[in-house]
Image (tube, rainbow, N blue to C red):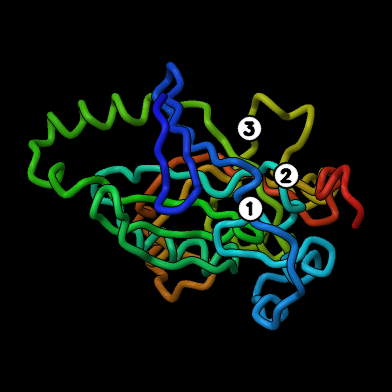
């Protein structure tokens, strides 16, 4: 690990685990102080931010808005996209399927584009395009790089909460993206809507180029062309009425 001092008083500790994951740790005190509610917060497009703002004060773009000042939380999780996958196509998948805010920005570290997906007040999934140096690498070397990089992500999954759970189920179902994890059938299945309704959970593991797939909101009706998989990452997706949503906090 190493310590990085910011331009003001902010200090970040970078920690790398034995499997290659990098954690950037900030002090909870760097979340700022409670202040008078500002008009910018009231106009936030994120409903959860508006809901909690009167209780915990001002929210910044890098804050985990559902937590109080001085409390810990995850600001973002960053993934490296496979070579050839573009941030803009990942953004389109989340916008059209999950109906969430997603935008493309330039990564200050890799110099490539990245997709920022809002999954909560001040909480983001960040998908970074592979460095441009890999685009000129031979197919054999690319596979070696990718095997080393993505083998560290095997078995990784994330859990998110969504609105309009039934609508999402129908969109993913029409694109044949719903997936029941055989390891957790005792907890949830999504083979049918009744299964997902009972557990208030669905899963999918492929982020695809939505314009190469049939169904959903796309106008492409080519039944013979399989969808292009941009990223494999299991999403355990829960309805807002799931029993674990906001557990331990007043609603």
Q: Is residue 35 visible?
A: yes
Residue 234, percent from left and from top: 55, 39
- Please name the residue that numbered disc 3 is placed on: 181
Residue drawn at point x = 41 percent, y = 24 percent:
1
Instruction: Kindly state the secondary structure of the residue where label 1 is placed.
Output: helix
User: Residue 76's spot in the image, x, y percent?
Assistant: 53, 48
Task: Mark 1 or mark 3: name the one nearer the start of the chain.
Answer: 1
Contact between labelled residues 3 and 2, with CB atoms less than 8 Å apart: no
* Vertical side of 177 occupied by 88: above or below: below
Q: How far apart are the alpha carbons under marks 2 and 1? A: 8 Å
Q: Residues within 10 Å of mark 1 (few under 14, many from 20)?
A: many
Q: CA distance from mark 1 to mark 3?
A: 37 Å
For label 2, the crowd category at 10 Å Cα-Cα, with few meaning under 14, some 14 to 19 and many 20 or more, is: few
Q: Which residue does the numbered mark 1 point to in the structure image?
A: 31
Depth check: 50 or 80 in front?
Answer: 50
For this rendering, which residue is in front, 58 or 202? 58
Question: What residue is disc 2 on?
Answer: 71
Marks 1 and 3: CB-CB under 8 Å? Answer: no
Mark 3 crowd level (few <14, some 14–19, many ≥20, 10 Å Cα): some
Instruction: Judge whether 206 appears above or below 57 on screen.
Output: above
Quadrant into which the C terminus falls:
bottom right
Number of marks drawn: 3
Q: Does residue 164 show up? A: no
For residue 100, which quarter of the picture? Answer: bottom right
As drawn, is 2 to the left or to the right of 60? Answer: left
């Amino acid at each position: 690990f190493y310590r990085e001092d910011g331009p003001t008083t902010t200090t970040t500790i970078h920690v790398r685990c034995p499997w290659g994951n990098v954690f950037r740790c900030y002090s909870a005190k760097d979340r700022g102080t409670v202040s008078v509610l500002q008009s910018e917060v009231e106009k936030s497009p994120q409903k959860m931010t508006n809901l909690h703002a009167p209780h915990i004060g001002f929210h910044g773009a890098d804050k985990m808005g559902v937590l109080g000042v001085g409390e810990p939380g995850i600001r973002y999780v960053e993934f490296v996209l496979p070579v050839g996958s573009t941030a803009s196509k990942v953004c389109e998948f989340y916008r059209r399927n999950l109906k969430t805010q997603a935008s493309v920005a330039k990564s200050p570290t890799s110099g490539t584009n990245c997709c920022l997906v809002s999954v909560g007040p001040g909480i983001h999934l960040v998908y970074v395009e592979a460095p441009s140096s890999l685009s000129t690498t031979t197919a054999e070397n690319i596979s070696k790089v990718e095997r080393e990089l993505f083998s560290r992500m095997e078995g990784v999954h994330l859990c998110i909460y969504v609105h309009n759970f039934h609508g999402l189920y129908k969109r993913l179902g029409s694109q044949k993206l719903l997936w029941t994890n055989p390891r957790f059938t005792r907890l949830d299945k999504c083979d049918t809507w009744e299964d997902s309704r009972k557990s208030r959970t669905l899963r999918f593991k492929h982020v695809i180029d939505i314009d190469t797939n049939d169904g959903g909101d796309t106008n492409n009706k080519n039944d013979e062309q399989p969808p292009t998989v941009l990223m494999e990452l299991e999403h355990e997706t829960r309805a807002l009425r799931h029993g674990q949503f906001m557990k331990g906090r007043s609603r």
